[in-house]
Amino acid sequence: MTDRRAHLLTRRAALIGLTGAAAVGMGLAQGAPAQPANSIAPPGLGQDDEPQILLTIAGDDGSATTIIPKIAVNYLRFRGANSIATSEADPPWTTQVSGTMLNGQKVAILIRASSSTDGMSLLAAGMADIGLSLREARPNELPGFMSLTPAEAARDVRPIALNAMVLIVNKTTGVDTLSFDDSRGIFAGKITDWRAVGGKPGPIHRYGRAIDYRSSNLLGASMGNETILPGLRVVSSYAAMRDSVASDRQAIGYIPVNFIYQERMNWSGDIQAVRFRLGDRLTAMPNEYGLATGDYPLVFPILLYRVPGRDNSEVESFFQQADSVQAHVDGMFAGLIPVTPRLLVPHYDKSLPTAYGNVIRNALRISTTVRFEPSSIKVDPRTKRTLDDLARFLRRLDVSPEHLRHLVFSEDTGSPDRNHDISDKLAAVFQRELKARNVRIGDSVSLGATYPLATSSNALGQWLNRRVETWVTP
C-alpha cells in the first residue's frame, strides 16, 4: 500500500493542480490523458509554513458546507491532530479544515463546494481525492467505474446520509398542495398560470439553481439531466431562493430539508411549504419516516465517490470516519437522516387499502426499501447496496421468518393482472437475492399497484412504486 506521506502535498500544489483541471477537466473526465500541472505558483503561495494536504474533496455545495467539514474535523482528530480549525480557503477551494500533528507538522483537508458534476469531473481528472455527489455516477463519468461488478463498485461509493428537497411557494399564490406531475409540469414550463393548479390567477415564476442537480427531477428533465430550462430565474444559494420566493408573490422554488432545519424556518412569514398529493390523498411527508424509507419523492442520498484503483489510504480512512457513529450524530444535528437501517413506527391510516392495512396494522417497518429501475428486474449497484444493507440488518435483528412480511409493489400499468405479474417477478428476484445473502427471509406478498406513492407517468414515479417494503409483525 502506498505510504501516506507519498500522497501529502501542499496547498500550493493543490491550487495549481485544480487550476489546471479547470482548463482540461471535462476532457479528462471523458478519458483524455492528464496534463502536467504548471510549475508556477499563484502569488502568495508556497511558503514553508503551508500545511500538507491530506485530502481534497469537491462536489455538492449543500453537503460540502454542512456535514463534510464536520467529518473532516473528526477525521483530523482521529489522526491525532490538535488545534483543529475550519476557515475559508483560497479559491477555487472554499473551506479548509486544518490542524497540527504531534510532531508539529501542519496538515489540512481542502473542500470545494460546487456541484455534483464538478466534483465528479475533478475526481476523474485526479484533482480531487473524493467526489461528493447527490446522484449515481453516469456511464463513463469515472475512469473504470462502470466496468466494475456491483461488489467491487460498493468499495468505491459510500452513502453517508439522506437529504431531501421541499417545494416552497409564496402564500399569495393560494397553493399548498400539488401533484408530483403538476410540479414537474410547472418546472418544465408546461404549466404557466397558478389557476391551472387551483391557485389564484397569475403567472408562475420558477426559481432554481444553475448548479443544482437536485432540481432536475423538479424541472421535468430526465433523471441525471442538469439542463436549466428556459424561463427559470436562477439564484446563487438556498438563502437567496428563500428570500426570492418570500418577496415574489408569484414564486415557486425549493430548499433542502437540512436548510429548513438549520434556519429554523417556522412558515410564519410569506413562504408556504408544498405537500404532494396523489388523487384525494396526501403522499409521504419530508420527515424522518418519508426520508428513511424513500417514500417521499425528492429524497437524495449524499454519496462519496473515489476512483477505483487509486491507492490512497487516506480516502479509505475518511470513508470509515464518514460511516462512524459520530458522523451519524453530526448529520442528525445538521438536519440529515442516517442511511443506516432502523425500525420505524408508521402512521396508520384507516383509509389504507385492506390488503395493505391488514399486514401493517401494529407492525414496524424496516426503513430500508428495495427499489428496482423501471422496466427492469436487474439488480443494479443502487439496488445491490440496498439489499446488502437490508440483509445485514435482518441478521442483526434475528427475527423469526413468521414475523417478517415483504410487501412487493409495482408501478401502475393500467392492467391489474399486469401489475401483479410485475410484483410477482420482483418478489422472485428479491427472494433469490436475500437467499444468496444467507438470511432468514419470511413471506413475500405481491400487491401490484395497490398503494402507489406517485403516478407512474414518469421514470421517477415508476421507480418509487417498484418497491419492496419489509415489515416486522407481532
Image: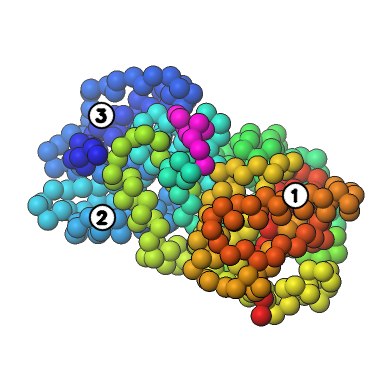
Of badges 1 and 2, nearer the viewer stands: 1
Name the image quarter holding the N terminus.
Answer: top left
Q: Which residue is mark 3?
A: 42
The amino acid type found where label 1 is placed reads Lys
Q: Are discs 1 and 2 less than 8 Å apart at CB?
A: no
Of badges 3 and 1, nearer the viewer stands: 1
Which residues are the magenta region? 142-150
- Residue name at image x 19 percent, y 56 percent: 81
Q: Which residue is mark 1?
A: 425
Say which of 250 and 301 sits in front: 301
**With 289 as the anchor, is 336 left or right in this view?**
left
Q: Could you tell me which secondary element the residue under label 2 belongs to?
A: helix
Sequence order check, earlier mark of 2 and 3: 3
Sequence order check, earlier mark of 3 and 1: 3
Sequence order check, earlier mark of 1 and 2: 2
Q: Which residue is mark 2?
A: 76
Q: Could you classify mark 1 by the number of other residues whose Cα lies within 10 Å: few (under 14), some (14-19), or many (20 or more)? A: some
Q: Could you tell me which secondary element the residue under label 3 belongs to?
A: loop
Real-space Cα separation, disc 3 to disc 1, in angstroms: 60 Å
The amino acid type found where label 3 is placed reads Pro
The amino acid type found where label 2 is placed reads Leu
When the figure is inspected, residue 63 is found, relative to residue 333, above or below; the finding is above
